C-alpha cells in the first residue's frame, strides 16, 4: 500500500469506527448471541478488507504490513468480530501447505468469508503438545484421526473448521491438521473471557482430520503473525487510551484548573505517549521483517512481545488511574482497554516467557 | 548476539541485517545504497583506525586532542567528516538518513567521539545563516580540523531556562564588548574558538535580545577554567569574558537571530542525541565481560531487558530518521530519543558495573590517559568503564534535561 492508499484506508476505518462502533454499539454487539455483530463482520468484507489477503503473485503472500491499520482500528474501537479467524494464524498455516491447489482453495475460503478457521494450537497448562494424531487406513485413502484437547480457540463459533496441531503418532513430530467444525467426535465448550469476548475449548475424540503440513515451521509462522497483529491491535488501544486520557485531563477541573495543568500528570501522560511511539516504530519494523522473512525474525518477535505487552499494560493501567473513579466504571472504554490488555498480554504467551526465551540464548 | 567483540569492530549482530527494506528504499531515493555504505563504514572502522587509537579504544581510555584531530582528518580523506554539509560548501549533501548511519557506525565501532561543535553545529549554521566572508574564513579550518570549536550556551543562572542568559555584548563602533560568563563548556580547554549566545538587547521577550557571536578564545580578557567532574575527567569548563572585544563581522545573522540559530542547531542534531550506536557498542562490551565471568539467570534476564530497550529505541530512531528524510517530524520523537537514549546508556553502564561487582571498585583514574606505571588492579578497561559510567549520569542532564524534554513533549504533543 502506498502512502496515499494507506491514508485513505485509515480514514475509512476511522469513519467506520465513528459510525459503527461507539460505546453503545459496542455494548449492543456484545449482547447478540454470537458475542459479536454478524452485520459488522459482513460489512468489513463488503468494504474489501478481506481482499487484503489476496497475494499479488500466485505463490506469494499478501504483505502483513497492509493489515496493521485494520488491526489498529480494531484495537482502538475494541471490535468484537473475530478477525483472527481470517487474518491471523490461518493465513500463515495455509502458506505452509505444499499442494498449490489446496493452498489456493483454503486461502480463497478465508477471503470470500466462506471458511473462516480457528487456530487450535495451545493447550492448558503450558506449551506442551499433548494432542495426538493417528493415521488410519480407511479404504483406499489413508486418513487421520485426532485425539486430545485444545484451549481457548478464538472465534470458534463462526469457524467452519479448525487448524489443529497434534503430535504425529508415527513420526513423533508435530503436524497441522484441518478438522471440520461438524466432524464427529468434536465437542465445543464456549465461555466468556476477561475481555468480554467469547472463546471455546475443543475436545477431539477420534475426529477425522486432514493432514496439512509439518507443524514446527507452521506454528512458528502462525505465532509470529499472531503476535505482530496483536501488537498492531494493542497499538490502536494505546492510541485510544492516550487520547481519552489527554481529553479527560483537559476537561476535568479540580483545584480551580484543568488536571492537565499539573506537571506531575503531564509527565505521566508523556511517558504513555513515548511508549506508544516506541511500539509504533517497533511494530512497523517487525512487520517489515516478517514480510521479508528476515533471518532473525523469531528473536524480533520476542522483543516485540515484551515491549508491547509492557507498554500496553503500563498505558492501560495509567489510563485507569488518570481517569480516577471513572476509570473503573463500565461506562468508559478505558476499563475495556484494560481488560482487553490482560487478554492480549497472555494470549500469545506472557512477556515474562518471552524475556525468558531471550535470556536463554543471549 | 552482542557478545562477539569487546570493541564491536567486527561484523554486527544478525538482528539488524540485512538492512531494513524501508531504509534501503529511502536511501535509494536519496541516491545511496544503505547496505553498501554501512559495509564501507564498517570496513573503514575495522581496517583504518591507527594503532594507537585502536589501543585506546580497546582499553576504554580517553583520546588525546591530537588523536581526535587525526581521526577526524582521516574521516575527511573520504569526505565523511563534513558529508552532511551542502555540496556547494564542499560537503556531500547527505540527508538525515545517511548522516545517521554514518554516526551510528562510528559509535558502534567505539571510535573517538567527533567534536560536533564545529562540523555538526557551526558548519551548518554558517552554511545557512553566515555570509560569504564568514564561510570563506571559518569553514575550511572546520573541515580540516585545524581549528577546534566549543559551544557557549549555558550560564550559571541559565541552564534549563536558557533564554534567560545574560552574557552581555554591547556594541561600540565596529566591535562588541563582551562581559560575563559561560559554563559547562565542553572541551573549551582544547578549543581555539567559541560560538556564543550573547545578549545584545535587554527587555522584551527574553528570546528576542539574543545574538550569535564567534569569539577567538585567544582574545584578551578570556579565561578558561576547568570544572572537575565526579568521573575524574576534565572535559567541561567555565569560560569568563572580561571586556572582550569582538569584531562585528563575527556576528552570524542579524542582531536578535541568536535564538533562531540555537533552535536550528538543536533541530538538526535532534536525531543523533540518542547515540544508538554507542548503546550498541556498550552492549557488546557488556556481553564480552559477561562471557568471561560467572553470570546468572537473573543477569541474563537483565541483559535481555536491555536488548528489548535497545531494539525498541533503534526502531524508533530509524522511524524518526525516515520521517526526517521525508521532510516530516513526529512531535514526540526528538525528546523521546534524548530521554530514552540516555536512560538506555545509563542502564547498560549500571549493568556493567553490577556485573563487575567487587572487581570493579578500583578507580586508578590515571589509567584513563595511558598505561599505568606501577601496579594495576584488575581489568585494564576499569578506569575507562567507571569513568564512562559516571559520565553517563550527565547524559540525562546535558542538552536539555530529561525533565525539560518531557515538558517539551507535553507542549508539542499535548499542547499544554
Image (spheres, coloured by chain):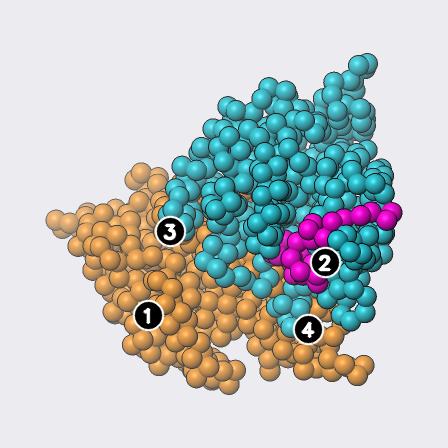
Chain colours: A orange, B cyan
The answer to whether residue B244 of the structure is visible from this angle is yes
Marks 3/2 in contact by CB < 8 Å: the verdict is no
Work out how far the residue at label 1 is from the one at label 4, CA to CA, in angstroms: 38 Å
Where on the picture, by quarter, is residue B352? top right
Q: Chain of mark 3?
A: B
How far from the left and from the top, in percent, is residue A177?
30, 53
Q: Nearer the viewer, mark 2 or mark 4?
A: 2
According to the picture, the residue beneath numbered tag 2 turns out to be: B211
According to the picture, the residue beneath numbered tag 3 turns out to be: B29
According to the picture, the residue beneath numbered tag 1 turns out to be: A49
Work out how far the residue at label 3 is from the one at label 2, CA to CA, in angstroms: 38 Å
Q: Chain of mark 4?
A: B
The answer to whether marks 4 and 3 sit on the same chain is yes
Q: Quadrant of the C terminus of chain B?
A: bottom right
According to the picture, the residue beneath numbered tag 4 turns out to be: B416
**Which region of the structure is painted magenta?**
B242-267
Q: Earlier in the sequence, mark 2 or mark 4?
A: 2
The answer to whether marks 3 and 2 sit on the same chain is yes
In the displayed structure, does residue A308 sit left or right of residue B238? left
Amino acid at each position: 500500500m502506498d502512502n496515499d492508499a494507506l491514508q485513505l484506508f485509515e480514514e475509512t476505518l476511522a469513519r467506520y469506527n465513528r459510525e459503527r462502533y461507539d460505546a453503545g454499539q459496542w455494548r449492543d454487539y456484545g449482547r447478540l448471541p454470537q458475542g459479536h455483530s454478524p452485520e459488522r463482520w459482513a460489512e468489513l468484507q463488503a468494504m474489501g478488507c478481506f481482499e487484503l489477503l489476496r497475494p499479488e503473485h500466485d505463490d506469494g503472500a499478501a504483505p502483513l504490513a497492509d493489515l496493521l491499520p485494520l488491526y489498529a482500528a480494531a484495537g482502538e474501537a475494541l471490535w468484537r468480530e473475530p478477525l483472527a479467524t481470517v487474518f491471523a494464524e490461518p493465513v500463515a498455516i495455509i502458506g505452509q501447505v505444499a499442494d498449490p491447489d489446496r493452498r489456493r482453495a483454503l486461502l480463497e475460503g478465508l477471503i470470500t468469508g466462506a471458511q473462516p478457521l480457528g487456530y487450535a494450537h495451545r493447550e492448558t497448562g503450558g506449551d506442551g503438545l499433548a494432542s495426538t494424531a493417528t493415521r488410519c487406513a480407511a479404504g483406499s485413502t489413508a486418513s487421520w484421526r485426532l485425539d486430545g484437547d485444545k484451549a481457548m480457540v478464538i472465534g470458534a463459533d463462526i469457524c467452519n473448521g479448525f487448524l489443529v496441531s497434534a503430535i504425529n503418532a508415527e513420526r513423533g513430530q508435530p503436524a497441522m491438521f484441518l478438522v471440520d467444525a461438524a466432524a464427529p467426535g468434536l465437542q465445543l465448550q464456549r465461555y466468556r473471557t476477561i475481555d468480554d469476548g467469547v472463546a471455546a475449548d475443543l475436545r477431539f475424540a477420534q475426529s477425522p482430520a486432514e493432514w496439512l503440513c509439518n507443524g514446527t515451521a507452521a506454528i512458528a509462522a502462525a505465532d509470529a503473525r499472531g503476535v505482530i497483529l496483536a501488537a498492531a491491535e494493542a497499538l490502536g488501544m494505546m492510541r485510544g487510551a492516550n487520547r481519552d486520557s489527554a481529553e479527560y485531563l483537559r476537561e476535568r477541573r479540580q483545584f480551580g484548573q484543568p488536571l492537565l495543568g499539573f506537571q506531575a500528570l503531564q509527565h505521566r501522560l508523556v511517558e504513555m505517549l513515548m511508549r506508544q511511539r516506541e511500539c509504533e516504530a517497533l511494530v512497523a519494523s517487525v512487520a517489515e521483517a516478517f514480510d521479508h522473512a528476515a533471518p532473525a525474525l523469531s528473536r524480533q518477535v520476542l522483543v516485540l512481545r515484551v515491549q508491547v505487552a509492557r507498554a500496553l499494560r503500563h498505558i492501560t493501567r495509567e489510563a485507569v488511574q488518570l481517569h480516577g473513579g471513572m476509570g473503573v466504571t463500565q461506562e468508559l472504554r478505558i476499563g475495556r482497554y484494560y481488560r482487553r490488555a490482560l487478554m492480549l498480554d497472555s494470549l500469545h504467551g506472557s512477556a515474562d516467557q518471552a524475556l525468558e526465551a531471550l535470556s536463554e540464548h543471549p | 548476539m552482542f557478545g562477539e567483540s569487546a570493541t564491536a569492530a567486527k561484523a554486527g549482530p544478525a538482528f539488524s541485517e540485512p538492512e531494513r527494506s524501508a531504509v534501503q528504499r529511502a536511501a535509494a531515493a536519496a541516491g545511496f545504497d544503505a547496505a553498501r555504505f554501512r559495509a564501507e563504514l564498517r570496513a573503514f572502522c575495522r581496517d583504518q583506525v591507527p594503532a594507537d587509537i585502536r589501543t585506546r579504544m580497546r582499553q576504554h581510555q580517553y583520546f588525546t586532542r591530537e588523536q581526535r584531530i587525526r581521526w577526524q582528518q582521516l574521516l575527511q580523506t573520504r569526505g565523511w567528516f563534513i558529508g552532511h554539509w551542502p555540496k556547494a560548501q564542499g560537503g556531500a549533501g547527505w540527508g538525515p538518513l545517511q548522516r545517521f548511519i554514518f554516526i551510528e557506525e562510528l559509535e558502534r565501532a567505539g571510535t573517538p567521539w567527533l567534536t560536533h561543535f564545529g562540523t555538526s553545529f557551526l558548519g551548518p549554521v554558517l552554511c545557512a545563516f553566515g555570509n560569504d566572508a564568514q564561510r570563506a574564513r571559518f569553514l575550511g579550518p572546520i573541515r580540516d580540523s585545524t581549528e577546534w570549536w566549543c559551544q557557549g550556551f549555558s550560564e550559571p543562572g541559565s541552564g534549563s531556562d536558557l533564554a534567560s542568559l545574560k552574557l552581555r555584548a554591547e556594541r561600540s563602533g565596529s566591535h562588541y564588548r563582551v562581559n560575563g560568563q559561560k559554563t559547562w563548556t565542553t572541551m573549551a580547554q582544547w578549543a581555539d574558538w567559541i560560538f556564543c549566545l550573547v545578549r545584545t538587547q535587554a527587555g522584551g521577550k527574553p528570546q528576542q535580545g539574543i545574538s550569535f557571536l564567534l569569539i577567538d578564545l585567544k582574545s584578551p580578557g578570556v579565561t578558561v577554567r576547568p570544572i572537575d567532574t565526579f568521573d575524574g575527567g576534565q572535559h567541561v569548563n567555565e569560560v569568563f569574558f572580561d571586556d572582550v572585544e569582538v569584531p562585528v563581522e563575527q556576528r552570524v545573522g542579524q542582531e536578535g537571530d541568536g535564538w533562531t540559530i540555537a533552535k536550528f542547531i538543536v533541530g538538526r542534531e535532534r536525531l543523533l542525541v540518542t547515540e544508538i550506536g554507542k548503546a550498541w557498542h556498550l552492549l557488546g562490551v557488556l556481553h564480552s565481560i559477561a562471557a568471561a565471568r560467572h553470570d546468572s539467570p537473573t543477569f541474563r534476564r537483565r541483559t535481555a531487558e536491555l536488548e528489548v530497550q535497545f531494539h525498541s529505541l533503534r526502531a524508533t530512531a530509524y522511524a524518526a530518521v525516515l520521517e526526517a528524510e521525508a521532510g516530516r517530524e513526529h512531535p514526540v520523537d526528538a525528546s523521546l530519543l534524548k530521554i530514552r537514549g540516555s536512560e538506555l546508556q545509563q542502564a547498560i553502564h549500571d549493568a556493567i558495573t553490577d556485573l563487575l561487582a567487587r572487581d570493579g571498585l578500583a578507580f586508578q583514574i590515571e589509567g584513563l590517559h595511558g598505561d599505568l606505571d606501577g601496579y594495576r588492579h584488575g581489568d585494564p578497561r576499569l578506569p575507562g568503564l567507571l569513568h564512562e559510567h559516571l559520565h553517563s549520569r550527565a547524559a540525562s542532564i546535558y542538552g536539555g534535561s530529561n525533565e525539560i524534554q518531557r515538558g517539551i513533549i507535553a507542549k508539542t504533543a499535548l499542547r499544554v
